[in-house]
Amino acid sequence: MTDQLICPDVVVCVCRNCVPDGGQLSQQWQQCGSHVLVREIPCSGKVNVQYLLHALEGGARGLCLVTCPLGQCRLAEGNYRAEIRIDTVRRLLGEIGLEPERVELLHCSPDDPPDRLKQLVHDAVERIGALGESPVRA
């Protein structure tokens, strides 16, 4: 295994409830010099701050969490919980001197056009990639 497979540059977590089958995203790809790794999760509301920070601690440039649009979570309030956790991670990153923009929350619905998720994720990866290497990885 190479380091890139062990430590991706951008981790994308996609809620299985809002985007079945990961919205047909590839599981990994290269974009703008960043290795992107996609993981499907059971519910965005189950994401723990500790696991989000673990990805960044491992040297990832950043991460994206894809949730249902606010008010449309199949499991009541999972996307609201996810938003609170993303805000917590952003605050903690700011406190230690890293850019809070390294973490993004994206909203997508199964009713959206098929290419919408792909475009949202690719745009987010581009923004995160523009921040450069993670100081943690160096």
Image: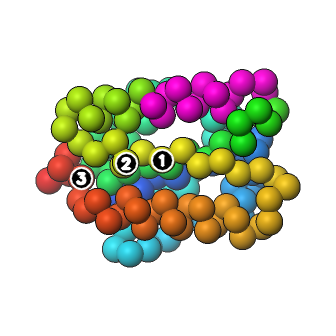
Q: Are marks 3 and 2 in contact (CB under 8 Å)?
A: no
Quarter placement of the N terminus? bottom left
Three-letter code, disc 1: Glu
Residue marked by disc 2 = 101
Q: Are marks 1 and 2 in contact (CB under 8 Å)?
A: yes
Local packing at callout 2 (Cα closer than 10 Å; few below 14, some 14-19, many 20+) is: some
Q: Secondary structure at mark 1?
A: strand
In the drawing, what numbered circle is on residue 3? none
Looking at the picture, how far across and down is residue 31, in whole percent? 44, 74
| Cα–Cα span, label 1 and label 2 | 7 Å
* Boundaries of the magenta span: 75-87
Please tell me whether residue 32 is drawn above or below residue 82 in the rendered image. below
Report the coloring of the rendering. Answer: rainbow
Local packing at callout 1 (Cα closer than 10 Å; few below 14, some 14-19, many 20+) is: many
| Mark whose residue sits in front, 3 or 1 | 1
Residue marked by disc 3 = 134
Apparent side of residue 3 relative to residue 70 in the rendered image (left or right):
left
Q: Are marks 3 and 1 in contact (CB under 8 Å)?
A: no
Three-letter code, disc 3: Ser
Q: Is residue 7 visible?
A: no
Local packing at callout 3 (Cα closer than 10 Å; few below 14, some 14-19, many 20+) is: some
Residue marked by disc 1 = 104
Is residue 127 a member of the stretch shown in magenta? no
Residue ID at (34%, 74%): 33
* Figure quadrant of residue 112: bottom right
Is residue 86 a member of the stretch shown in magenta? yes
Residue farthest to the right? 111
Looking at the picture, how far across and down is residue 121, in whole percent? 56, 61
Q: Is residue 71 visible?
A: yes
* First-in-chain label (3 vs 1): 1
Which one is in front, 69 or 137?
69
